[in-house]
Amino acid sequence: MIVVPACPTAWPWTLSAWAGSPGSISDEARAAYHAAWADDANIAGSCDDYRAGATIDAELDAEDREAGHKITCPVLALWGDPKGRRDLTEVWSRWADDVRGAGLSCGHFIPEEAPDALLEHLVPFLARPLER
């Protein structure tokens, strides 16, 4: 478990700690994150989101799984996987009928660290017609 203090000056460490490689976050992106983290409401919202993922979201997900509910639209799952060791499509297939995706050679901040790889997966996924 990672404990993150609800303090804007403590959050910038995530840009280094969660990035796939040192220096992979541009100065422009860092400035945008720092500006967002200067707002206490943004920090509170981020903490609430992570807290919900570990509590009520997990409970609601378990209820959905027990009821046999699944996501019926196509799902694209992309994740940061700098060492190429994980395949999370199997995990997502427990929740959805049509899953595709890949681990990208980056850390937590996919749009900032691997924008070209993100677009290589996202554009064709969004461009394909939905099957009815």
Image (cartoon, grey):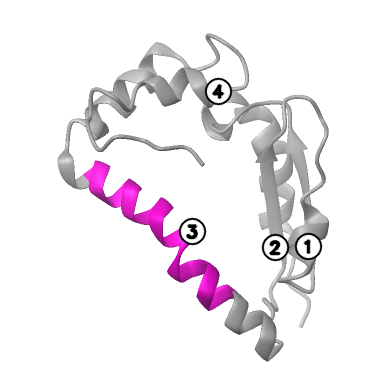
Give the residue displayed 44% in from the left and 70% down from the top: 56
- Magenta highlight on residue 53: yes
**Contact? badges 3 and 4 (CB < 8 Å):** no
Residue drawn where x is 23% and y is 22% of the image: 9
Whether 95 is drawn above or below 82: the answer is: below
Residue pointed to by mark 4: 19
Residue 7, compared with residue 17, is above or below; it is: below
Q: Visible in this render: residue 69?
A: no
Between the C-alphas of marks 3 and 1, the distance is 23 Å
Viewer-nearest residue: 39 or 129: 39
- Compare residues 81 and 129 and report the one nearer the observer: 81
Instruction: Judge by depth and name the residue closer to the eye, 68 or 36.
Output: 68
| Lower sequence index among marks 3 and 4 | 4
Compared across the picture, whether 110 is left or right of 34 comes to: right
Highlighted range, magenta: 42-61
7 relative to 72, above or below: above
User: What residue is pinned by disc 1?
Assistant: 99
Dot placed on the residue nearer the N-terminal end, 4 or 1:
4
Query: What amino acid type should be assigned to the residue bearing mark 4?
Result: Ala
Instruction: Give the alpha-carbon distance from disc 4 to disc 1, as whole Å.
Output: 25 Å
Q: Amino acid at mark 2?
A: Val
Q: Main secondary structure of the magenta part?
A: helix
Mark 4 or mark 1: which is in front?
4
Q: Give the image quarter of residue 97.
A: bottom right
The reply, left or right, for residue 5 in relation to residue 122 is left
Q: CA distance from mark 3 to mark 2?
A: 22 Å
User: Which dot marks residue 54?
Assistant: 3
Disc 2 marks which residue? 75
Q: CA distance from mark 2 to mark 1?
A: 5 Å
Q: Nearer the viewer, mark 3 or mark 2?
A: 3
Q: Helix, strand or loop at disc 4?
A: loop
Query: What secondary structure is found at the residue carrying circle 1?
Result: strand
